[in-house]
Image: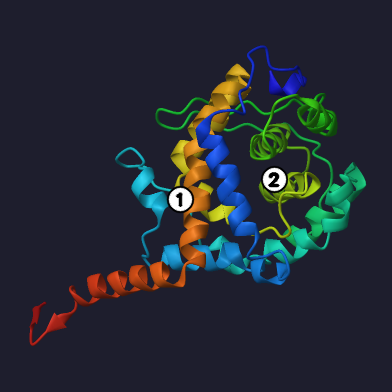
Amino acid sequence: MLLSIERPTTKISSEDVRWASLEARLDALNLLYARTPWRSFGNEARCALLMRSGLLFPIDKAFSAPHGTGHPSLDRFLIRPAIEPIVYSSWNRFETWDIDDGWAIKFTTLLTSQNTQLRSVSVDKPALGDLPPMKYASLETAPLWLDSLAAIRSFDGLTSLQEACLVHASVVLHHPLSDGNGRLARALFHGSLCSRGRIDAPFLATGPIMYRASHSYMRAIRRLSHTGSLTTYLDDICDLLDATIATQEQLEDSEALGRAIEGMSEEVLSHQPVNGGFR
């Protein structure tokens, strides 16, 4: 299993055309940030605000939750400190993968605006509808999170995006800190890509996307927590990553974004009263 940092027993193929396409699209997006990394600052908040306003993204077309289930509120991305400037402040560390417990505590304290420590209590999440319970690392194995990341980064044959997805999942499942583990996981998703020379800024709005597709994401990560199958997890998460990149492509395409906003405005106007009735 992932938590025991064992190598996968089934070969993970990086030759899948889906992953090759995602890598190429990541390269194209990165060109927009290579000399202006500050443009990424606030991407999660911007994406969350547009989603909250009713703008439809590729994520909405690709994922749906069972009737009666929703997704977490996007408001937290608007009231929390923006993650991107804090992530970029550690870019030099990511380039050399200079990651340790002390850095993680200080970094996550900045992200959460409160003192963060290594986790000292057990955590669990019960079953939710058709989703099984989440199995987090025990207090004994949670401190092994850095060993798990090192093991993942030593696996042969992974693409940079596959590695980043597994780094993110390992941090989530080990849950090493008292707070801010999700934000730390998203930071190290970008940090992993940085360390492999793939991106120049933390520009993918992974947080809002995971919230909007929370049922699909929780199904994938909870299944991984039970089976430890990295191959299955990457199959499960590939479509979500595709939607994340597609959403960022739409945000960067001013014409496409303009058309989407125009469509949203027309939808809103069609429900406004006109002379005592509706359009």
Q: Position of residue 199 (x, y in %)?
A: 71, 54
SS for callout 1: helix
Note whether 60 is above or below 75 in the view shown: above
Q: Amino acid at mark 1?
A: Arg
> Where does label 1 land, which residue?
212
Q: Residues within 10 Å of mark 1 (few under 14, many from 20)?
A: many
Note whether 17 is above or below 253 in the view shown: above
Q: Amino acid at mark 2?
A: Phe
Rendering quarter of residue 196:
top right
Q: Is residue 161 left or right of residue 244?
A: right
> Where does label 2 land, which residue?
189
Q: Residue at x 67, y 48 (%)?
A: 186
SS for callout 2: helix
Q: Residues within 10 Å of mark 2 (few under 14, many from 20)?
A: many
**Residues at circles 2 and 1 in contact by the CB criterion of under 8 Å:** no
Q: Residue at x 72, y 46 (%)?
A: 193
